[in-house]
Image (cartoon, grey):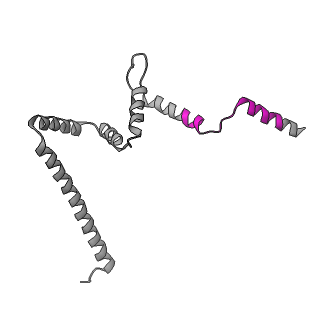
Amino acid sequence: MTRPSKQARHLKKAREIEAQKLNMKRNDKKRKIDEIINKMNEQKLDNTLDLITKLTESSKERINLISSVQELSEEEVPTANHLIKTMRYPKGPNEGKLISPYLQNKAYEYMSQSLYKRQFSVSNSLQEINNAMENQN
């Protein structure tokens, strides 16, 4: 039987080391969780269990939203909070509910089209047209 090449042995060893590192990180996380749990009283344990149970039963969208919020920098948190508070229907049957994704996309399109394009004022546009007409004569 042929012996694996040096590169193959090296890759195998690298995979083993990476697996060990991941296992160590996982064990470290478990240890930290155990420390926190051991400091909790019975009521806090019950509340934590309820939260974890509800979280695992929640939809993927809710979990993704929570993860996105947790990834925000400290400077972005107030802005995100303001966004969620203000992007709600002000009147009508949907009052207080978040604005629909369709309207969110329309607002985004409007902003991206007008915010990042060169702004023309009426006087500048008329001046350019006037100069072009004079050049033709």
Can the viewer see residue 15? Answer: yes
* Quadrant in which the C terminus is drawn: top right
> Is residue 125 part of the magenta span, yes or no?
yes
Choose between 27 and 4: the one closer to the eye. 27
Percent of width and height locating residue 112: 55, 37
Q: Vertically, is 26 above or below 89?
A: below
As displayed, is residue 24 above or below residue 36?
below
Residue 130 lies left or right of residue 87; in this view the side is: right
Q: Give the range drawn in magenta.
A: 110-131
Camera-side residue of 134 and 40: 40
Quarter where residue 88 is shown: top left
Residue 42 point in image, percent of width and height: 9, 36
Q: Residue at x 39, y 43 (%)?
A: 73
| Residue 87 in sight here | no
Q: Position of residue 64 (x, y in %)?
A: 33, 41
Residue lying at 14% horizontally and 36% vertically, measured from the top left: 44
Position of 101 compared to 24: left or right? right
Residue 133 x/y as whole percent: 85, 36
Classified by dominant secondary structure, the portion drawn in magenta counts as: helix
Q: Residue furthest left?
A: 42
Is 68 in the magenta? no
